[in-house]
Amino acid sequence: MWRHIASNALTFLVVLCFLVGGGLIWAQNEYGAEGPLDAAICLEVPRGSTMSRVSDRLVEQQAISSGMLFRLGADYTDKTQDLKAGSFLVPERASMAEIVEIVTRGGASTCGTEVVYRIGVNAASVEVRELDPATGRFVEIAKFDPAAEAVPEEYRAVRQENDTRYRVALAEGVTSYQVVAELGQVDALEGAVELTPAEGSLAPDSYEISPGDTRADLISRMQRAQELILSEAWANRADGLPLASPEEALILASIVEKETGVAEERPQVASVFINRLNRNMRLQTDPTVIYGITNGEGVLGRGLRQSELRAATPYNTYVIEGLPPTPIANPGRAAIEAALNPAETDFVFFVADGTGGHAFAETLDEHNANVARWRQIEAERAGQ
């Protein structure tokens, strides 16, 4: 009899082990399997939230099949205590394992509302926008001039939300004076900038910020980024360039940046100035003359006068030899790389071609013909 009981107990234990093992295998497969989401969602995780609350929210949004299994999986992988606050994009069909990774890996929020302070060459703006999870694109909620007295209610509202993201977006070709002036309008930042940074020393880019960050620290980040870009580009520069230092490369890059808004043209524009320097020709570029007039403190807003083109100033490249004494704007990475790795051409002239780009020429006769075509286009536009 005891032998029979022992045999049954052993059988029960074996079956139980198989059941437990099978259950574990099922749970592991279910935890890593494709989820039920038909479309991406934006998951908000408030500060002080718990994995239990997150799992309940995911069940409500039909993103997971089991809140308990989601919590057990997070516990089993030791990630429960790593939960981060923010707004996170959960893609369609995301598994429970993938969602746990999304809400615990840290870093900036990946969806929700963001405020972008744009500093452009001709104007500055503040944009309030929200990510549409279905398309992965941001939808503009409000846009306004930071100097305006009337601030949209939408902006006031998102400034009160804890998960709002903030960025400062610096356009290529802005001057250091413009950057400092416009950062003064960013109410998410604190502190003052005592001195205007050296022209050309700030890297145009998009910078994530947090309310309470200082303007001086952001300026330092921009400077470190530009130093790294310039250092890398200088180390990988083409041979035989008529540029004695990274500083001279930065000056040339700023001229290239201001001369064309067509990204594909930068290497060609750079080649024109490199060829002119190699042939001891004056650069004869309007943007340097304009900088000498405005000191980078604004847009000239009119054409250059003949007296200004003849004036002997440090920035008048129609009069001086070689490069001006400083950059004339903050060039982006592409302009710096173009200045240090220009296209191999024999071009020494260029003029607008009416399409937003330029017509390039190797000889004065070719250039004069291009200029004549441009004058005709200008006259036809004026007559419309």
Image (cartoon, grey):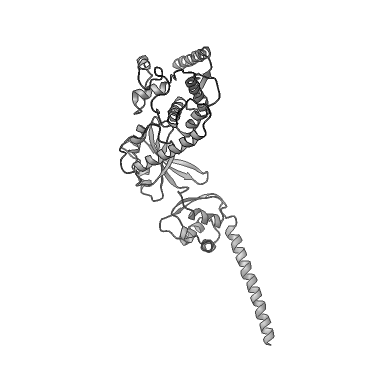
Q: Is residue 300 at least partly visible in the picture?
A: no
Q: Is residue 170 visible?
A: yes
Give the image location of residue 175, x and y in percent. Answer: 38, 31
Residue 318 in the image: above or below residue 1: above
Q: Residue at x 62, y 64 (%)?
A: 25
Q: Looking at the rendering, in which quadrant would you find the N terminus?
A: bottom right
Toward the viewer: 94 or 36?
Answer: 94
Residue located farthest toward the bottom when viewing the structure as drawn: 1
Instruction: Report the residue at 46% width, 35% height from top.
Output: 230
Q: In the figure, residue 168 lies in which quadrant?
A: top left
- Residue 120: where, in percent of width, then height? 40, 33
* Relative depth, front residue between 272 and 291: 272
160 shown above or below 355: below
Name the residue furthest top. Answer: 365
How many numbered marks appear?
A: 0
Residue 48 in picture, x, y percent from top left? 41, 58
Where residue 369 appears, as percent x and y from the top left, is: 52, 13
Relative to 24, residue 206 above or below: above
Residue drawn at x 37%, y 39% is 219
Between residue 214 and residue 167, name the one nearer to us. Answer: 214
